[in-house]
Image (spheres, rainbow, N blue to C red):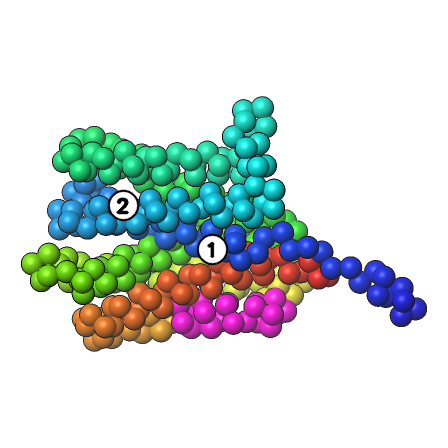
Amino acid sequence: MEESIVTFNAFHHVAWGTTISVYFWLVGASAGSFVISSFGWVFGIKRYKPLTMTASVTAIIMLLLVPFLLTWDLGKPIRFIYLLIPGYWHSTGPMAWGTLLICLYPMSMMVYSYFVLKHDQTFARIFGIVAIVLALSTHWYTGVVMELNPGRFLNHTALAPLLFLTGAFISGIGLMNVIVFIRNGLVRAENRYDWALVHEMAQFMMYGIVFDIFLLFLDFMQTTYGNQNEVMGHTVVLMQVFRFPYLWLELVIGLVIPLVILVSPLKHTKLGAFVASVLVIVGVYGMRVWWVMGGQYLQSFY
């Protein structure tokens, strides 16, 4: 009897691991950073124009890391070619569209950045709008890929794309705040970005945090009062196995503490905005970890 139990106690290979978690974080932070880049040239908020190229270059660099992560994660990197061959491309497959978006998004950002350098307001705005749509679509698709997995109870929710986009917004802003802090500490006073931008972006980040908490509350209600599988996903996976990335990294460190900072007088200090930004970046990565690996837990071990 014991031998038969051991024989059938076969564990499945976890298809998506840390590499995919990092990929989701990079795409989100890239999209959020690029939205900041567009404030000046697309939306006409002139005080953000000095920040445009820093935000745009950051977004481009982060997204250019993505293809290396994805092809390496395949195990046989040469297989990525199949997603680029028309005969293998399927219009009904979210990953097929994701491949297209990952290719088009950085190119659109590069074209936008070129016209910004040329101080061509018209074309910068046109390609900026295109790049924004592609940026949001690229991260929206990652949420859709996770959503369309009925067997993964934690992931199978229509809130997935919204959670991913909100996480992208706040992590992108947090990243830009950290970069501004570092840059301002390295350059002369006359070349520094206006510190008022940091405090304003921190306010935007606070609004995103509040919305993210609201979405997580909705997800909490579904997993707490849902069917047996959804309840197990919350009680076993989130509150036991992935308790640290879910409860501590995302909720406490990444959302609650930054929100407390940003609604208190600390939000008016440089240190307060910096600490809140760092914590949000860490918290959003925690969300990517439990969302990717936690969703596979019940499939892999039960």
SS class of the residue under badge 2? helix
**In this orientation, does residue 270 appear?**
yes
Q: Position of residue 124 (x, y in %)?
A: 21, 34
Q: Position of residue 115 (x, y in %)?
A: 20, 34
Residue 43, located in which quarter of the rendered image? top left
* The magenta segment: 235-255
Q: Does residue 74 appear left or right of residue 54 in this picture?
A: right
Secondary structure mostly seen in magenta is: helix
Q: Residue at x 56, y 48 (%)?
A: 73
Q: Amino acid at mark 1?
A: Val
Q: Position of residue 91 (x, y in %)?
A: 54, 29
Q: Position of residue 191 (x, y in %)?
A: 10, 56
When the figure is inspected, residue 117 is found, relative to residue 187, above or below; the finding is above
When the figure is inspected, residue 190 is found, relative to residue 144, above or below; the finding is below
**In this orientation, does residue 39 appear?**
no
- Determine the residue located farthest toward the top in the rendered image: 87
When the figure is inspected, residue 243 is found, relative to residue 296, above or below; the finding is below
Is 248 inside the magenta-drawn segment?
A: yes
Q: Nearer the viewer, residue 57 or 122?
A: 57
Is 33 inside the magenta-drawn segment?
A: no
SS class of the residue under badge 1? helix
Residue 93, located in which quarter of the rendered image? top right
- Determine the residue located farthest toward the left in the rendered image: 190
The residue wearing badge 2 is: 56
Mark 2 surroundings: few (<14), some (14-19) or many (≥20) residues within 10 A: many
Count of all numbered marks drawn on residues in the image: 2
Tell me which numbered mark, 2 or 1, is placed earlier along the sequence: 1
Q: Residue at x 42, y 42 (%)?
A: 138
Q: Residue at x 27, y 62 (%)?
A: 178
Q: Nearer the viewer, residue 16 or 234?
A: 16
The residue wearing badge 1 is: 22
